[in-house]
Image (cartoon, rainbow, N blue to C red):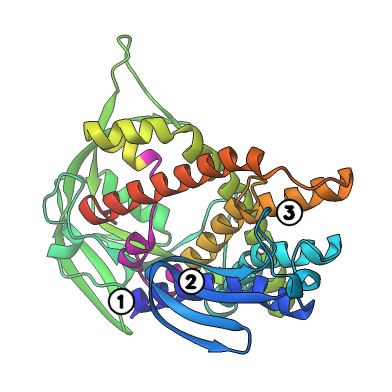
Amino acid sequence: MTAAVMLIGIVLMIVIHEGGHFLAAKAFNIKATQAFFGFGPKLWSITRGETEYGIKAIPLGGYVRIIGMSPGEPVAPEDADRTYRAAPFWQKTIVVLAGIASHFVVAFLLFFIVFSVWGQIARDESGDRVPTLTLALVARTTPDGAPAPARIAGFEEGDVLTSLDAAVVTSWTGFVDLVQDRGGDSVVIGYDRGGEPAQVPVTLALIERPLVVDGEAQTDDNGNAITEEIGYFGAAPEIERFNDGFLSNIGAAGSALVTAMWEGVKGLWALIVGFPDLLRGLFTGDDEILNEVRPITPIGLVRIAGPLESTLGILALVNVFVGIVNVIPLYPLDGGHFAVAVYEKVTGRVTDVAKLAPIAAVVVLFLVSVGLVGLYLDIFRPLQL
């Protein structure tokens, strides 16, 4: 079900983006001759008025053909007054930026829906999420690949932990401390399921992990990582949430959007500067590199679709990232079209198409390369969540 939501969300993202350009052009009587979802061979189309609407074979984007938008494009004499290039600067700006703006508007609305339906996430004084004692996830295995104790004991999502042996559990942190001190021991864990209290014996696993002090991994004099053995249960908690109403959720959605934009800028920069390392990791099979910086395509997004809340959140982040990519002032991205319009407004000169072609070629080559790498990884080395 949520995989379908993810797929529909991606399709709608593309349609809304191109629809923004299309509606803005129509509003200013700028002629748009084509509006297609996808690229490549045409699968279906229908013409209404002066515009051909349709679907193409490769569902990795879409486009609206607005006459005169590409510098140097030939234009029929009868359409000269209805071209993008003939429009005033402010109209060009709206036509170009309408698609970009759509991503941030959609992301804001998705964040608002998530907060309104599921609530905002509570945080402590340090800004960390506040966990509850209700289980949100029961792991299948330990980090070593053995069956997880919680799974063996029959725990389910929604169970509320109440005790461990004789100790009453009052917080998730307290429960984790008890578990980590009892690695390898057999304990009795109390819980509540649907209002019915119960207890079950559990043999806690013993796992090894790097020793971390004040957020830093500890090493010995030779630079080797210092490890420690701790107890392991194999479950993750739900996070405490609250809902303070419409205005509060509006503010939270705005804050989430700003945070997502900043993280998106950092992520895009990491992808650009880390692309050579990504290629190296692709050919050497270095999972550490691939997990640090890797692109993801709609195939991967559909595969990682989880609960509806997280799916909507991911769609919001994808919209933000695509919007940020399109802001880049390089032709043929939307930001590049805007940069050309600004240049022509400031200088009064018509853009030299020959100078734009190499830039466009580099941008397209990079985007296609990233897309192909992401496609390969999503098919042959999918994310494991």
- Quarter of the image for the C terminus: give it: bottom left
**Residue 295 locus on image (x, y percent):** 40, 48
Quickly name the residue at label 2. 312
Dot 2 alpha-carbon crowd within 10 angstroms: few under 14, some 14 to 19, many 20 or more: many
Q: Nearer the viewer, residue 185 or 211?
A: 211
Determine whether the residue tagged by mark 1 lies in a helix, strand or loop. strand
What amino acid type should be assigned to the residue bearing mark 2?
Leu
**Residue 238 locus on image (x, y percent):** 41, 66
> With respect to residue 240, does 329 lie above or below?
above
Quickly name the residue at label 3. 338
From the viewer's perspective, is 2 left or right of 264?
left
From the viewer's perspective, is 98 left or right of 152?
right
Q: Nearer the viewer, residue 265 or 276?
A: 276
Q: Where are the magenta residues, as a range?
A: 292-311
Which residue is at 54% across, 81% downward?
Answer: 52
Determine whether the residue tagged by mark 2 lies in a helix, strand or loop. helix
Q: Is residue 168 visible?
A: no
Q: Mark 1 or 2, which is nearer the eye?
A: 2
Q: Is the Cβ of the residue at disc 2 closer than 8 Å to that at disc 3?
A: no
Which residue is at 85% across, 60% downward?
Answer: 89
| Mark closer to the chain start, 1 or 2 | 1
